[in-house]
Amino acid sequence: MSSRDRILARVRAAVAGAPEAPAPARAYLHSHTPDDPAAVLDVLHHNLADYRARVHRTTGAGVAPLIAELLAARGATSVLVPTGVPDAWLADTVGVRVVEDTEDSTPAELDAVDSVITGCALAVAETGTIVLDAGPAQGRRRITLVPDHHICVVRVPGQVVASVPQAMGRLDPRRPLTWISGPSATSDIELDRVEGVHGPRTLEVVLLDA
């Protein structure tokens, strides 16, 4: 008998005859935000900004000029664009080399890219969190972890939920989920904040009113 078998046998003996565990309580609120799309969007904007993401609001007609402005302000000469990103988002971008998301891209090649543009799966208002699941317009997880500047477009209101419980009901747990709350950051024992540690130093979120 292995050590594992002996340990499990002792556990079974200890709980033999014990009453069944009670069913878990599910009476908690699934959202703390009013059921109003405008209010949910305001909460999302506030919490994204609180996490030091740069938040922009625009419409379909304004998304291309806005993205061009953000890339120009960054001084970007190259931008990584995964499959599924609409060509219209880059219609006003001039002088910026578009890099495709390919399987054989090395970390060094990704690090050399100035910016990356993606969509998202969902945005959670109460936590200021963007969720990526490698779906259309999102690409592989690594493309949002290596480049230093991430522009993420959230379609409003279709991709916005109020709370994490609402998000879990719409996400597929079998997909590679990446939860992003602001730019990558950490703090040492002196509480000195350092950004860009294990992800982009700058996160820009475009709330696109569909």
Image: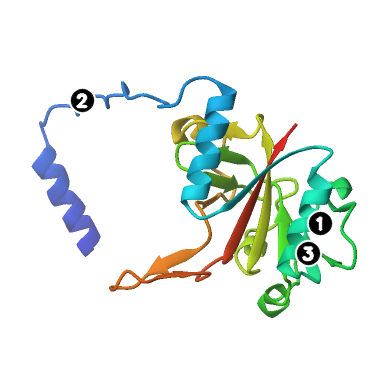
Q: Can you give x and y, in whole percent of width and height, for residue 137 in the image?
A: 75, 48
Q: Secondary structure at mark 3?
A: helix
Callout in the foreground (2, 3): 3
Q: Report whether residue 70 is seen.
A: yes
State which quarter of the image contains the C terminus. top right
Name the residue tied to disc 2. 22
Say if 204 sits above or below 131 in the image: below
Q: Earlier in the sequence, mark 1 or mark 2?
A: 2
In the figure, is residue 86 to the left or right of 162? right
Tags 2 and 3 in contact by the CB under 8 Å rule? no
Q: Secondary structure at mark 2?
A: loop
Task: State the CA–CA distance, disc 3 to disc 1.
Answer: 6 Å
Residue at (88, 46) in percent of width and height:
88
Q: Tell me the kind of residue under disc 3.
A: Ala
Q: Can you give x and y, in whole percent of width and height, for residue 78 in the image?
A: 80, 70
Tags 3 and 1 in contact by the CB under 8 Å rule? yes
Q: Tell me the kind of residue under disc 1.
A: Ala
Q: Tell me the kind of residue under disc 2.
A: Pro
Name the residue tied to disc 1. 68
Residue at (12, 50) in percent of width and height:
10
| Depth check, front residue: 123 or 74 | 74
Q: Can you give x and y, in whole percent of width and height, for residue 91 in the image?
A: 90, 51
Tags 1 and 2 in contact by the CB under 8 Å rule? no
Q: Which mark is residue 72?
A: 3
Q: Within 10 Å of the Cα at label 2, are there few (<14), some (14-19), or many (20+) other Cα atoms?
A: few
| Depth check, front residue: 107 or 188 | 188
Q: Report whether residue 101 is seen.
A: no
In the figure, is residue 79 to the left or right of 108? right
Residue at (32, 25) in percent of width and height:
28
